[in-house]
Image (tube, rainbow, N blue to C red):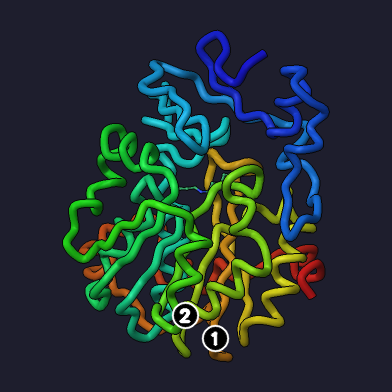
Amino acid sequence: MDSLHKGWFTEFSPDDLEKIKNTGNGQDKQLRSDGQEMGGAWPGQAFSLQVQEVLFHEKSQYQDVLVFKSETYGNVLVLDGIIQCTERDEFSYQEMLAHLPLFAHKDPKKVLIIGGGDGGILREVLKHKAVEKVTMCEIDQMVIDVSKKFLPHMSHGFSDPKLDLYVGDGFEFLKNHKNEFDVIITDSSDPVGPAESLFGESYYELLRDALNDTGILSSQGESFWLHLPLLQHLIAFNRRLFSKVQYASSPVSTYPSGSMGYLICGKQDHDLSVPARILDSAALKEMKLRYYNSEIHRAAFVLPQFVKEAFE
Ligand code: SPD
């Protein structure tokens, strides 16, 4: 069986898919960080969406790129068999990954996005009037191109004059940028394949060095239901690198387990769960926010007891 089958797309855990297709034993499709295996992505479970029409399906230099129109979730972007976003629920992820660090910061002017080729994070960053320049480094031009074509509500920021776009490897890009950014947002896929290097300690050392003294980062932080060993590892090494390391989450119905996490680290020792600017209802409307508000900001950092204990 394949991911696209009889009018449905099914998101198998990459290790399970390898076994189902009989192309391997799943070992090389485990999540990885710093060379350590962190288990399968979501073994033994799968999520399906009904497909109305396949809009695009090609292999880029880096990955399998699929866009389909679903029956109930709008257009869906899938990379290497894994859902990156659907038009129906993308705003929860994009708003939280972008606005948690941006509103925790007093005055974010220079922002770097690593990944984020669909443009959703860029759309949110550009809503901040204080932001003067957004730099984006996305490795895969094909992701940008299909997003411009099939996800126009996410990708309209690519024409904004504040954007400097680099198509290339984020890890390599960071090596040449020191003490430069107020906020860095890593909007990556999972650590199986091209994004693995974005989940290791040396990547976070580069992030720390690219941030200025008051800098804050946010990174795609997987799910506490599925990836506790990986998250424990990320939190442990980041506590050595940053003064503040915090974790938030929000529901995203089409991500595995329906929950997505956000790793937020700051170079200064102040509580990142407290927004530096509070939004009134006029500001919420003006920014067209659908998930994020100032109460959600604080609430997102409140963690279930088993997660708190795991992160102690
Ligand atoms: N398990 C999939 C996680 C995908 C996170 N990145 C999504 C990119 C959307 N801008």
Q: Quadrant of residue 311?
A: bottom right
Q: Is there a contact, CB below 8 Å, between mark 2 and mark 1?
A: yes
Q: Which mark is residue 217?
A: none
- The amino acid sitting under disc 1 is Lys
Quadrant in which the N terminus appears: top right
Q: Amino acid at mark 2?
A: Leu
Q: Give the labeled residue for mark 1.
A: 267
- Residue 295 in the image, given as x and y percentages of width and height: 46, 71
Name the residue rendered at 45%, 80% in the picture.
178
Closest to the camera, between mark 2 and mark 1, is 2
Q: Which mark is residue 211?
A: 2
Q: Residue at x 69, y 34 (%)?
A: 13
Circle 2 SS class: strand
Q: From the image, which quarter does the C terminus lie in? A: bottom right
Percent across and percent down for residue 38 are 79, 51
Is 96 situated left or right of 74 in this image?
right
231 lies above or below 178 = above
**From the viewer's perspective, is 44 left or right of 245?**
right
Q: Callout 2 environment at 10 Å: few (<14), some (14 to 19), or many (20+)?
A: many
Does mark 1 have its CB less than 8 Å from ligand 1?
A: no
Q: Earlier in the sequence, mark 2 or mark 1?
A: 2
- Residue name at image x 77 percent, y 67 percent: 305
- In what element is the residue under mark 1? loop
